[in-house]
Amino acid sequence: MIDKDIDKQGSDAEVQLPKGGDTESQVPKGGDAEVQLPKGGDTESQVPKGSDAEVQLPKGSDAEVQLLKGGDTESQLLKGGDTESQILRAAEQEFLQKGFAGARTTEIAKAAGVTHGMLHYYFRTKEKLFEKILAEKMGLLKSLMAKSIIEKKLSLQDRLRRVIEVHFDFLASNPGLPRFFLDEIISKPERRELLMNGLRQNAPELVNAFKRDIEKGVEEGVCRPVDLRLLFINIVSLNVFPFLAAPLLDGMFPEFMENREEYIEGLKRENFETIWRKISLK
């Protein structure tokens, strides 16, 4: 009987679950529409929240939007990318505030306005959420830096200014990231490789662009020979420290915090001038 109902509807994904019956035994085995629900009447309430049984549907299939017509599950799945984005933003805040170990997927789901099962449907584990956020941030930084790299007609001075400003603006938009990454690397050394892999994707092109400019600058008497490793350490140190030490600096120099925009612009300008004075011959 259930097979006939499915054929009439014309969709492999649609499952007609009769009310009050043995729901598990009446779902055809092996199809996209198969959902592993425990035997018993109230199918929704008997699925453990956050378990794999609640969310094992192939992503992107018709079955994804045919489950529990009229319920939260259907409306949240139909949102698609919006739901995933909400989860990511909520997870980012939870990680930044509590660290990876202290973050709870139940709290992330609550902040995102989705069920715990929906969160696991999109990301499965807290580790995958963390990796996704890290990949997003590294990808954003790479795309921002690429704009400084592809402009080949920039002078060394202008390229240096651009890179310092782009990096600093990225940190200003994500002020909690430096402390979060440092804490995670210290508390979980195995995460170091994950972070380093992200950084390695950005470094080669940027280093090569600077290498060409510095070699040309040395030939033209514009700058002195520079160890690029030390140059980048200096840039990162100057840019990152204000965000790592923000709680301390806020207490020491509260007047800076009265106008944050002016404070940010002043730091960017000072950081560039400090680096340029170090390498410039003019």
Image (spheres, rainbow, N blue to C red):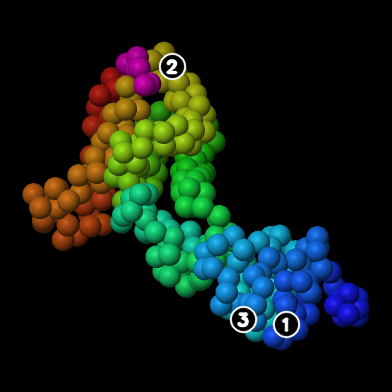
Marks 3 and 1, the one that precedes in the sequence: 1
Percent across and percent down for residue 164 are: 35, 38
Give the mark nearest the N terminus, 1 or 2: 1
Count of residue discs? 3
Q: Nearer the viewer, residue 27 or 160?
A: 27
Evaluate whether residue 8 shows in this view. Answer: yes
Left or right, 114 with reference to 169: right
How far from the left and from the top, in percent, is residue 232?
35, 28
**Quarter holding residue 29:** bottom right
Magenta residues (range)? 223-229
Q: Is residue 70 placed above or below 85 in the rendered structure?
A: below
| Residue 215 numbered tag | 2
Q: Quadrant of the N terminus?
A: bottom right
- Left or right: where 167 falls relative to 263: right
Identify the residue under disc 3. 42
What residue is pinned by disc 1?
A: 21
Q: Is residue 115 above or below residue 227?
A: below
Question: Residue at left 28%, top 20%?
Answer: 281
Q: Amino acid at mark 2?
A: Glu
Q: Is residue 227 magenta?
A: yes
Quadrant the C terminus occupies: top left
Front label number (1 vs 2): 1
Q: Residue at point 46% right, 66% down?
A: 109
Query: Where does residue 250 sit, x and y in percent of width and height?
Result: 14, 53
Does dot 3 land on a helix, a strand or a loop?
A: loop
